[in-house]
Image (cartoon, rainbow, N blue to C red):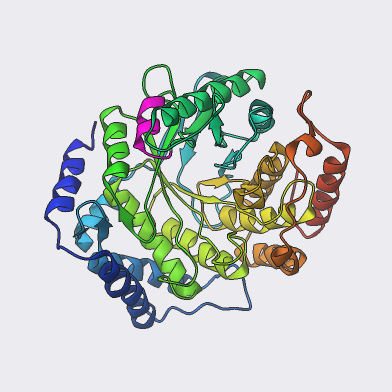
């Protein structure tokens, strides 16, 4: 409960901050504010590269994010007010953020640590369906396919559409039942994988704070698991989300703050996206006081985060945070490709390499087929994502950029075709929970090719 006084301050600001209509916040404060700082701080990317290496420009993005956020603030839709913070308050909150946090139990205790650019310390690896809808008959096996991978430090569950034969409805008792069904199935998968102490992130099934608060109470998700609270795009929160934060603080829980801005729109071009992601991570630390922060920017048409423009923005955001703070950061791999496609592995190569060399603390993945096709997810692509993240640790950014550009050349022409691949029951044996020969052959072939590019896979 160390953050109770800060929580009360946030609540007061949500009630007393400057009144503002949501449309005005979007246009006058977010869009205009991002556009202003891009010009004032002369933020321009080298489009010949994916991983940006101009550290002076990267540090200007950090300063631009602080400048922008001080002028913009965070909007509370429940009170229609802006919560505004000074530069000094932001810097104090950043300094107060933890530089490491312990998750998991028993043999699966893991310590998440802050990393620097080109750090030789490998990032942690989290994996799972990440909110993808899973069929009831395959749910436990799919989750086991992730938990049984030794490289995974944290699992992130999928969701279900129906519980006890009924469609789940937000803020109803069915949401509570579905959230508890998630707990039961995830813990069953952990036991089957022989890793009962492995940390899990929840509650993915919760559509509101109702299911979330129920399923992290007695008998549900454990104090060693990770809870999640997101900002609403762009830079907004509400009472429901702050209720989650309040409960986590009062129970000394481990919270991950999440923010996924959209390329274009209010963010503008990729330079603006980098500023907005960076500002969002600072805003999460200010308002939610999480242990760690995560992002997954969204492409407006492809809905992935592996398009080159987004990758450039992510390389800048990650390096800007790593160079100027000790925030514990995470980046999600959300590819267009799905299981049994080369595309998903090349997309993972690009994202995991960028995350690792640019100083991210944990690489999250893989939300295969951008999480919209039922059962199109397996533990094998998460293994590959983690292996790449570990192998890339310590590489110079110039060398890593060459690897990333080769990977992008492999998958970029295929992004509009949406190669979602095969569902779990065809990519794995659902009984033995082992990859099918076809999927292993694709994995081995791509792994060998990527290693030939200079990525030191073990």
Q: Is residue 205 above or below residue 322?
A: above
Q: Is residue 155 visible?
A: no
Question: Closer to the camera, 376 or 334?
Answer: 376
The residue at the far left in this view is 16
Residue 209 belongs to the span the image colors magenta = yes
Q: Hey, which quadrant is residue 252 in on the image?
A: top left
Give the tally of numbered discs.
Answer: 0
Residue 265 belongs to the span the image colors magenta = no
Question: Is the N terminus in the top left, top right, bottom left or bottom right quadrant?
Answer: top left
Q: Is residue 146 visible?
A: yes
Where is residue 54 shown, x and y percent of the image?
Answer: 51, 73
Q: Hey, which quadrant is residue 432 in on the image?
A: top right
Where is residue 109 shown, x and y percent of the image?
Answer: 51, 26
Q: Is residue 426 above or below residue 447?
A: above
The magenta-colored residue range is 207-216
Where is residue 433 shown, x and y percent of the image?
Answer: 76, 27
Give the residue drawn at x 22%, y 63%: 87
Where is residue 156 shown, x and y percent of the image?
Answer: 55, 37
Question: Is the C terminus in the top left, top right, bottom left or bottom right quadrant?
Answer: top right
Q: Hey, which quadrant is residue 172 in on the image?
A: top left
The residue at the far front in this view is 166
Q: Is residue 339 above or below residue 452?
A: above
């Amino acid at each position: 409960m160390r953050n109770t006084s800060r929580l009360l301050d946030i609540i007061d600001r949500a009630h007393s901050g400057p009144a503002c209509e949501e449309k005005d916040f979007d246009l006058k404060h977010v869009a205009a504010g991002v556009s202003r700082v891009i010009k004032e701080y002369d933020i321009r990317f080298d489009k010949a590269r994916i991983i940006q290496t101009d550290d002076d420009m990267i540090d200007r993005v950090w300063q631009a994010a602080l400048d922008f956020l001080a002028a913009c603030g965070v909007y509370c839709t429940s009170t229609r007010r802006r919560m505004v913070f000074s530069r000094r308050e932001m810097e104090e909150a950043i300094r107060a953020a933890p530089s490491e946090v312990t998750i998991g139990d028993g043999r699966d205790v893991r310590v998440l640590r802050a990393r620097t650019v080109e750090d030789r310390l490998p990032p942690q690896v989290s994996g799972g369906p990440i909110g993808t809808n899973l069929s009831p008959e395959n749910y436990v096996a799919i989750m086991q396919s992730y938990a049984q991978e030794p490289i995974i430090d944290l699992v992130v569950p999928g969701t279900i559409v129906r519980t006890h034969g009924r469609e789940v409805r937000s803020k109803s008792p069915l949401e509570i039942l579905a959230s508890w069904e998630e707990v039961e199935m995830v813990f069953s998968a952990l036991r089957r994988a022989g890793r009962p102490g492995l940390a899990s992130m929840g509650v993915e099934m919760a559509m509101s704070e109702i299911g979330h608060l129920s399923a992290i109470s007695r008998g549900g998700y454990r104090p060693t698991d990770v809870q999640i609270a997101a900002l609403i795009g762009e830079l907004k929160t509400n009472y429901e989300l702050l209720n989650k934060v309040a409960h986590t603080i009062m129970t000394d829980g481990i919270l991950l703050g999440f923010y996924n801005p959209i390329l274009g729109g209010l963010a503008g071009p990729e330079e603006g996206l980098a500023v907005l992601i960076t500002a969002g991570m600072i805003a999460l630390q200010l308002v939610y006081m999480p242990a760690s922060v995560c992002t997954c920017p969204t492409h407006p048409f492809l809905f992935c985060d592996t398009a080159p423009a987004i990758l450039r923005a992510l390389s800048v955001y990650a390096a800007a945070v790593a160079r100027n703070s000790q925030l514990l950061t995470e980046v999600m791999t959300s590819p267009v490709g799905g299981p049994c496609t080369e595309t998903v592995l090349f997309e993972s190569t690009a994202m995991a390499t960028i995350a690792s060399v640019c100083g991210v603390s944990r690489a999250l993945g893989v939300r295969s087929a951008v999480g919209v096709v039922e059962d199109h997810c397996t533990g094998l692509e998460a293994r590959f994502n983690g292996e790449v993240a570990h192998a890339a640790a310590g590489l110079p950014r110039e060398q890593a950029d060459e690897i990333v550009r080769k990977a992008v050349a492999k998958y970029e022409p295929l992004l509009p075709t949406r190669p979602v691949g095969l569902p779990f029951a065809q990519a794995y044996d659902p009984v033995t929970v082992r990859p099918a020969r076809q999927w292993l052959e694709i994995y081995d072939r791509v792994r060998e090719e990527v290693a030939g590019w200079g990525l030191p896979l073990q």
